[in-house]
Image: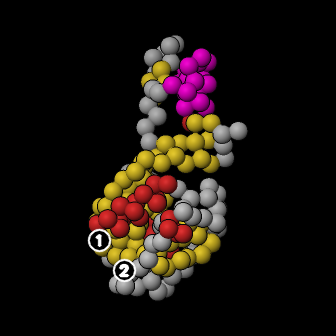
């Protein structure tokens, strides 16, 4: 059974009072007045391009979307700037060093893990790297890589619609 994070707030995290208004945003406790907004968490994604204008696609090694395509990226850590998060995630998942990154676009997403869905704002950057060598997959996270110009077959195999939309947007900028 999958439920949104807002549905998980059955008790006030401040005073412990039970609520009858699960699933509402903002969560508002009638007992103590605590208010919590279910704002999206931030994630970054890199459209990594080589000197031949080919893109780097990941084959995801775990759910959600195991076996489907994705872009290098992940959640932004607390206190971490987007650009730093992008460089960290690309390095962790691919062993590549981003030499230049520029903001491209953003799209809303939902991420379901272990039955709980959270809202995510995916922020995408066009990333340049000197080379796709050495390309090393992060064990457990990345099954393999696919380097190519985007095709309908690739776009139809994305784990997340936001990734597909970002690649489509990138293609309109060329």
Q: Is residue 19 left or right of residue 104?
A: right
> Marks 1 and 2: CB-CB under 8 Å?
yes
At 48% from the left edge and 20% from the top edge, which residue is drawn?
A: 28
Residue 61's image quarter? bottom right
Residue 53 badge: 2
Query: Which residues are drawn in magenta?
Result: 6-24
**Which element carries disc 1, helix, strand or loop?**
loop
Q: Is residue 36 magenta?
A: no
**Which element carries disc 2, helix, strand or loop?**
loop
Q: Upstream in the sequence, badge 1 or badge 2?
A: 2
Where is residue 3 drawn, in percent x and y? 62, 36
In which quadrant of the rendered image does the C terminus lie? bottom left
Height in image: 46 above or below 132?
A: above
Circle 1 residue: 174
In which quadrant of the rendered image does the N terminus lie? top right
Please identify the residue farthest to the right as the structure is shown. 1
């Amino acid at each position: 059974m999958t439920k949104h994070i807002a549905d998980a707030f059955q008790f006030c995290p401040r005073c412990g009072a039970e609520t009858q208004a699960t699933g509402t945003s903002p969560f508002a406790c009638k007992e103590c007045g605590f208010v919590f907004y279910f704002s999206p968490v931030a994630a970054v994604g890199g459209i990594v391009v080589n000197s031949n204008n080919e893109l780097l696609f990941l084959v995801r090694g775990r759910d959600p979307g195991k076996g489907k395509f994705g872009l290098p990226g992940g959640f932004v850590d607390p206190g971490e700037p987007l650009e730093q998060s992008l460089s960290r995630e690309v390095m962790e998942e691919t062993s590549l060093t981003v030499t230049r990154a520029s903001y491209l676009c953003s799209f809303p997403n939902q991420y379901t893990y272990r039955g709980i869905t959270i809202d995510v704002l995916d922020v995408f950057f066009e990333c340049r790297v000197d080379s796709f060598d050495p390309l090393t997959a992060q064990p457990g996270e990345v099954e393999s890589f696919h380097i190519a110009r985007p095709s309908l077959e690739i776009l139809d195999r994305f784990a997340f619609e936001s990734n597909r939309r970002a690649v489509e947007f990138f293609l309109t900028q060329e």
